[in-house]
Image: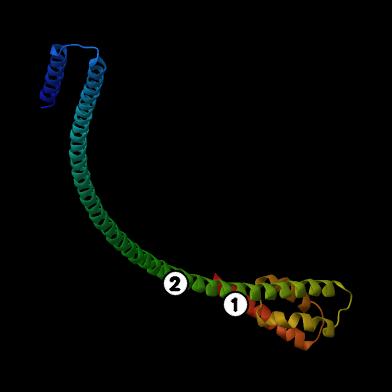
Amino acid sequence: MIKNMNSSCYCLALCCLLMLLATPVTAANTEQNYSQQLELMNSLNKSEMQLKFKEIETKLLERINELEQQNAMIQVRLESRESDLGNYLDVISWVSGIVIGFVGILFGIGAFILYRENQDVATKTQSQLDAWNEQTANIQITFDGWFNDAKVNYTRELDFMTRLMRLRNLLDQANPTEDEIYPEVSPLYADPQLEYLPIFRKILSLDLGAGIQRHTETAIAQIMTNQKVVK
């Protein structure tokens, strides 16, 4: 279309020039011809410029339309991608929620099982500790009884040994008296032992009184009876 308009303008300009050339040239109308030619040239230039502007405007409109179409397509794609992304995020959120919930359930079940196992272990441990405490208490009672008996026996034996040493010292002295001997020997009469026999015989060899002699003879007789029973 624009090319046809350009061809028409060119033909019109050519016709005008031919008409001017065909007109007889005189001195009077020479200046008028120049003026007409200039006006004609200006009109042609304006027409050509308008045609070029029109062509540029048309191209710009076409380019704008293309850009608008491309922009619309891009917008549609972006909206589609945003929708897909939103759906993807929704799916991820849903799956994450399910996974987190499942993990929470597993954690709760594991914690409950661990708690029950700890309770069972604690109960068994407490039962075992109670049993050990009872055994320890029994052992402690037994040990305390044995220790008290040993302490009593040790104290008694120590007392007897001390008395025996004092009796030996008293009997080795010259002319010991009944008042010195009897307090030391009287506890030995209650439980006469074989190791007391030399002391008792030493007492019988001395004249310390009828009472000490009678108790000493009785203790010696009991020692002899105990030895026969043992044999």
Q: Secondary structure at mark 2?
A: helix
Dot 1 amino acid type: Thr
Q: Residues within 10 Å of mark 2 (few under 14, many from 20)?
A: few
Residue 140 or residue 91, whichever sits in front:
91
CA distance for labels 2 and 1? 51 Å
Q: Quadrant of the C terminus?
A: bottom right
Q: Disc 2 or disc 1, which is closer to the eye?
A: 2
Dot 2 amino acid type: Asp
| Residue 82 position in % (x across, y down) | 23, 47
- Number of numbered discs present? 2
In the picture, residue 126 is in which quadrant?
bottom left
| Residue 58 position in % (x across, y down) | 18, 32
| Residue 228 position in % (x across, y down) | 57, 73
In the picture, residue 216 is in which quadrant?
bottom right
Residue 71 or residue 7, whichever sits in front:
7
The numbered mark, 2 or 1, whose residue comes first in the sequence reads: 2
Q: Is residue 125 left or right of residue 108?
A: right
Q: Is residue 114 left or right of residue 44?
A: right
In the picture, residue 103 is in which quadrant?
bottom left
Q: Secondary structure at mark 1?
A: helix
Residue at x 81% of width, y 81% of height: 181
Asked if 141 appears above or below 17 in the picture, the reply is below
Asked if 113 appears above or below 183 in the picture, the reply is above
Q: Residues within 10 Å of mark 1 (few under 14, many from 20)?
A: few
Q: Which mark is residue 225?
A: 1
**Which residue has dot 2 on it?**
130
Residue 26 or residue 111, whichever sits in front:
26
Q: Is residue 207 left or right of residue 83?
A: right
Residue at x 19% of width, y 11% of height: 25
Asked if 117 appears above or below 47 in the picture, the reply is below
Residue 140 in view in this figure? yes
Residue 193 in view in this figure? no
